[in-house]
Amino acid sequence: MEMEKNFNPQALESELYKAWEEAGAFTAHRVEGKKPFTIVMPPPNITGQLHMGHALDCTLQDAAIRYHRMKGDPTLWLPGTDHAAIATEVKIVAAMEKEGLTKESLGREGFLERAWKWKEEYGGRIVHQQRRMGISCDWSRERFTMDEGCSKAVRETFCRLYEKGLIYRGARLVNWCPCCMSAISDAEVTYEEKQGNFWHLLYPVKETGELLELATTRPETMLGDTAVAINPEDERYAHLHGCHVILPLINKEIPIVCDEHADMTKGTGVVKITPAHDPNDNEVGARHNLPLVRVFTYDGHMTGAQDASDDIENLEVLDCGKYAGMTTDEARKAIVADMTALGLVKSIEPLTHEVGTCYRCNTVIEPMVSKQWFVSMKPLAKPAIEAVTSGATQFLPERFSKQYMNWMTNIRDWCISRQLWWGHRIPVWYCDDCGEMMVLREDPCCCQKCGSKHINQDEDVLDTWFSSALWPFSTLGWPEQTEDLKYFYPTDVLVTGYDIITFWVSRMITMGVEEMAGVTPFKTVLIHGLVRDELGRKMSKSLGNGVDPLEVIEKYGADALRFSLVMGVSPGNDTRYAEAKVESARNFANKVWNASRFVLMNVTEKVEMQPEMLTAADKWILTRFQDAARQISGNMEEGEFGLAANRIYDFAWSEFCDWYIELAKSRLNGEDEAAKKAVQGVLLYVLEGLLKLLHPFMPFLTEQVYKSLPGSEGFLMLKSWPEIKPELDFPADEKQMDGVIEMIRVIRNLRTEMNVAPSKRTRMMFVANEGWADTLTASDMYFRRLAGASETVVIAESELGTEKTVSAVTEAATIYIPLGDLVDFDKEIARLQKEIDNLTKEIARAEGKLNNQGFVAKAPAALVEQEKAKLALNQQKLEQVEKRLAELKESL
RNA sequence: GGUGCCAUGGCUCAGUCGGUAGAGCACAUCGUUCACAUCGAUGGGGUCGUAGGUUCGAGUCCUACUGGCACCACCA
């Protein structure tokens, strides 16, 4: 097949992908008796499009998957998408707003219809983008968190946990996002540093008339105060025990309570208590049985007379009077102004503090008391912690298990209900007539207790992470005992970023061990970092520094993008995206393309390797190849994809292209047909192996080249991973060839330093060291082709004439090049002197080491031997260089 | 406040069991008939953040410190 001069991925990628997919190459097959390799893909949200983080994530997974598939494991990579409850709903609502629509105007059903259309469109877009990345997941098993099976798993889990008493409903203080209009979990709150103030307020004490000073960062909550707390040990306020303060602005009498929460060392030691809007105050309130007074509406305004009360015990919704209807910000200003007018603001102190915000929309979180559903986490966390301490699930790198442990050992109950429409509806029904609450696997027709038809389903949906937590087994068919579930569960490795260990990894392990009889959902959690921009900043929409993977693919090809993401990446560490890296990867792809082109121009039919015809050069590349294959296999097993990529890069470029192809040319262009055939066999063998090693990272390029290889059949992606064959390791020949390569390098260096024109060919004389003569004689063609030799002769030292030469000492031989008038002898003397200096230094180092009794006694014997050998070699070299220098000086 | 990570050539990063520091990019010089200028050859450039310690030997292990970052907790 004719190959173009440059690799043009754009034209080939979609065709190749189509061919793979149509042939069913991605489809997983269960093979009884064989150990499978399984990854479930972290499902991307259907909110938008693929970003660089996804690109990295799926590149790593695909590399692992393609490696295992080639190794012959029954391999399943299960893809899917996540409905992303809040995130998606927010986007849909925003889109609707532009059309003048609201959720209410559409109604629940109308909204859901729209949401499903959104899912079709954006889910489809994501999947298309993933295909462009070239990922080899099993699309026939593609899942969606809200599809029938996953929904069934969600409902089953909810019911089971409820029946075990591990899910409960209660009125509790929760993190409320006034923008999303929903409760969110603790994990969904991120803390941001914000500028604020410490307002020092004065509350008059009813019994004594004194003004009690306290500080707050949130004066707008003061109308909801139901107490003021002092520390029982605080002597400054001992006289106030049992007294009351008059809450200014609304002149309400509230008690002064004694509570540990009041910290004597902070501020004045007095703290106002707002149990309905602050987590700590809520606890204080519970301890002292204080009433709850809600002063904010769920959409972030001050409550008024018209605001309905919640059906929550002990909670009053305050009519904030003149402040009613103001936003909380407006209320803050107004209340501070009014307090100032009353002379009740003692001072204002600027303060930067951490404020909780919604991780989706960045809105400041408003703690609110409301009725929500919770998962009782403590009992569930125990076996999940055990799964990691026992090593059943292992984090890579290991340090991330600490982050997991930290979260799991301090776990608090998980608020799972969301006041949204897009998501799994909570499977709970209430009877209007008898008040019965029913938690059911199947939708009921009527009340199970009284038979009434007046029943209503809970309005709320579940946290999106609830369904995500079940992903490793819900996608395999659970709660049905499907063949897939039996065969592929537990999965082998989860590949994800450290940013969702708490959100997702911890919950998958929790739910996995709970529902799957204690079997943890994956053996290894391979953590990668974030893809940052060139300046090391997080890629984000607000900064506008995101790079669209699709655009990069258009310009450089998917292989180049994939390779650039993997090069130099190490587990758990962030990586920076830079176009220069992609360019470099593209150049590499082109290099491999051209090396392949070269092979195909010279090898037009299938040629087997002929073991008896192998030269030192052939044995050298075969040994190097096996070394690379060994290392890369090890790296792939350990999730060290960056190291694997570096090694294949180095093997392909520096060893195969720079050396072996150049060495092969002599025989390919020679007259000896048998030798030609032998080298063709090696070229073909090594190229095919190289393509296999590279395939997990550059699937398109390697598959395309493979198609053109003589004797190729089927897809490279389904071929077997290179096998290490002991009979193809030739350490002795490898060493001989290394010696020749060193000589070629040294000669090139000499010529450059002596300013010899590249076109100038010269005769070269080698005085071979013991054991090298034959190799050097056989390597004449290499020196001619690669070192500018017109001819080479291997001679005894005594045969050297009086000709003026430059020389160099290598492990294999001392090289003498007669350069006649071209030689600048001052330069040559300086060069030799420098060489002597280097050798002297090196000898001193080795001698120092070997004279150290500790080293000789304690270091491994092999190392000591190695040092000795090196020392001897260098001493020999030094002797020769010194002699050479003396001769040269004399001859002048 | 707790925990963890990072600090290696101008830049981006590797560095597996502790055994004389590597790559890519950038830079300098030279080179295009014969796979590739998305290329080749050659070269310059590093007291591995600082100070101690363990060891025959430390970029690698330990301690402290400095600077950057992350997670968790707190924040009246």
Image (tube, coloured by chain):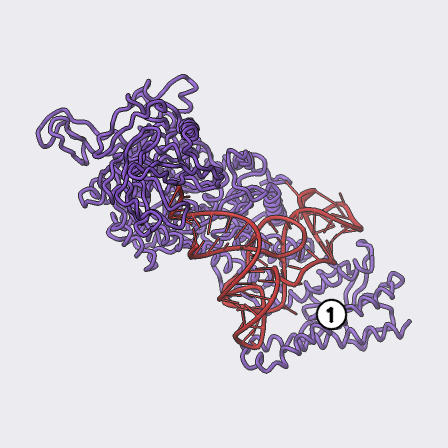
Chain colours: A purple, B red
Q: Position of residue A46 (x, y in %)?
A: 40, 33
Identify the element where label 1 is drawn: helix
The C terminus of chain A - image quarter: bottom right
Q: Residues within 10 Å of mark 1 (few under 14, many from 20)?
A: some
Which residue is more in the foreground, A890 or A844? A844
Q: Position of residue A809 (x, y in %)?
A: 74, 70
Classify residue A218 by image quadrant: top left
Which chain does the numbered disc 1 sit on? A
Describe residue A378's horizontal placement relative to residue B23 as left or right: left
Vertical side of A302 occupied by A477: above or below:
below
Instruction: Work out whether residue A669 can be spotted.
Output: yes
Q: Position of residue A42 (x, y in %)?
A: 39, 42
Classify residue A303 by image quadrant: top left
Question: Residue extending furthest right?
Answer: A892
Residue at image x 39%, y 51%?
A493
Instruction: Work out whether residue A91 can be spotted.
Output: no
Tell how many labels.
Answer: 1
Residue at image x 35%, y 55%?
A393
Vertical side of A346 occupied by A472: above or below:
below
The residue singled out by tag 1 in the image is: A838
Q: Position of residue A355 (x, y in %)?
A: 43, 39
Amino acid bearing label 1:
Asn
Which residue is more in the foreground, A200 or A276? A200
Question: Residue extending furthest front?
Answer: A208
The N terminus of chain A - image quarter: top right
Residue at image x 17%, y 30%?
A430
